Image: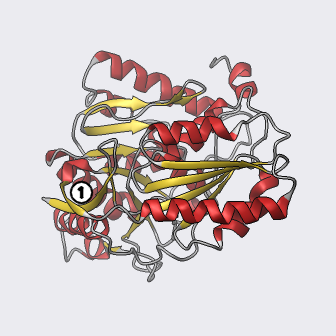
Amino acid sequence: MTFNGYVRKDGSVGIRNNILIIAVDECMDGVARKISEEVESSIVVTNHYTCMLGGNEETLSNMINAALNPNVAGALVLAMGCGSIDPKIISDKINESGKLARHLTCIKKKGTKRTIEEGKILLKEIEDFASTFEREAVDISKLIVGVKCGGSDTSSGLASNPSVGKAADLLVDRGATVVAGELMELVGCEEILCNRAVNKEVEEKMLRMISNEEKRWSVGSDTEVMSVGNSVGGLTTIEEKSIGALHKTGTREIQDVLEFNQQGHEKPEKPGMYLSDVTMLCGGSGMHFAAIGAQLILWTSGGAGFNNSIVPVIRVSGNVDLINDDIDIDATGIMKGTVSVDEIGEEILEKIVQVANGEKTNIEDLGYSYCTLYQKDIRLEQCLGLR
């Protein structure tokens, strides 16, 4: 099984040919968006978290590695100039990978108008570089597919999650890589997951990381760990939700649990099934998947529509009452008893190849979630004894 993608100089293969404009501090967000008007394929990523580097290296790593995603051809990096994140640190790493990156500092360029003017010129240069890439046939083993749920309800655990799990198995069997996130939504499933760990080291890492995530999201007795929509949809506890969410990971051996911290973002070292630190928060999860190299995301839901502008999202729903035209794969037949999980799993695999070949998902160019840069708060980590 093959698809037609953009082969990058580092050997990775993109299914889109985008350009990032990275604002390393929020003061440059408006400048970045004004420059972005010049090139349709450009995507703005803004660091709203902080302009300070010390203690926030995880955010820096997220920005760098998102730009290294195969779906990105190059990047323009912008900074105001009074913060501690040097844009050259980011552009240098991007250039080292064989992509084209440029950087600008507003203060050094004598203000906003001049920065925008020069930024548009540099963006056009990067666009010309991106245009040199053309699609060519590659094996499906070059794909890294992220798996996440959102807007979950009782149909998720019965229809969309199991069918995505089937697709995950089909991908792994063909030599591709699948990465599931949301460790908080695997609480209660540890014994099952440990039986799938490729070795004892992965098993111990899995238990540690799931436990740590539970501690982060359970600070205080009134902490909300499930959305109102989950409860309205019939889910009563995080453990009950986890039993359904588990199915989207399929059944194959788990090679590792990818960890994100101040040392960087771990990435898959070989094909197979992985768990990861990818957050359960939708906008942040899209950027996490981008940072580990995923070219697309399978997203299971009742009827909600999540999108990301760097990594295309294939949405799957089995909810007869809520499904709408945001959804790419209709799994309601499973709930009606007219189709099997295996059949929908095969349909998802076919859709993956179509999207990898360039076909747009239903809302790919519409209503995207902002590219949120999410990181663990090191102060909370220290309070909880996780550092």
Residue 195: x %, y % from top left: 26, 28
Q: Is residue 236 visible in the rendered structure shown here? A: no
Q: Quadrant of the C terminus?
A: top right
Residue count near mark 1 (Cα–Cα under 10 Å), binned few <14, some 14–19, many ≥20: many
Residue 109 in the image: state x and y as whole percent: 81, 52
Q: At x 56% / y 32%, what residue is drawn?
A: 213
User: Looking at the rendering, in which quadrant would you find the N terminus?
Assistant: bottom left
Residue sitting at x 42%, y 60%? 299
**In the rendered image of this protein, does residue 380 appear above or below residue 23?**
above
Residue of label 1: 167
Q: Is residue 259 left or right of residue 117?
A: left
> What is the x, y in percent for residue 20?
56, 57
Q: Is residue 213 left or right of residue 156?
A: right
Quick one: SS at disc 1? helix
The residue depicted at 85 percent of the width and 48 percent of the height is 107
Q: Nearer the viewer, residue 236 or 104?
A: 104
Q: Is residue 130 above or below residue 359?
A: above
Q: Is residue 18 above or below residue 76?
A: below
Q: Amino acid at mark 1?
A: Ala
Residue 262 location, quadrant: top right
Task: Find the residue positioned furthest to the bottom.
Answer: 325
Q: How many marks?
A: 1
327 or 121: nearer the viewer: 121
Q: Is residue 323 left or right of residue 37?
A: left
Q: Tell which of 252 and 162 is nearer to you.
A: 252
Does any portion of residue 125 appear in the rendered image? yes
User: Which residue is located at x 71 percent, y 26 percent?
Assistant: 378
Residue 319 rendering spot, x and y as whole percentages: 41, 73
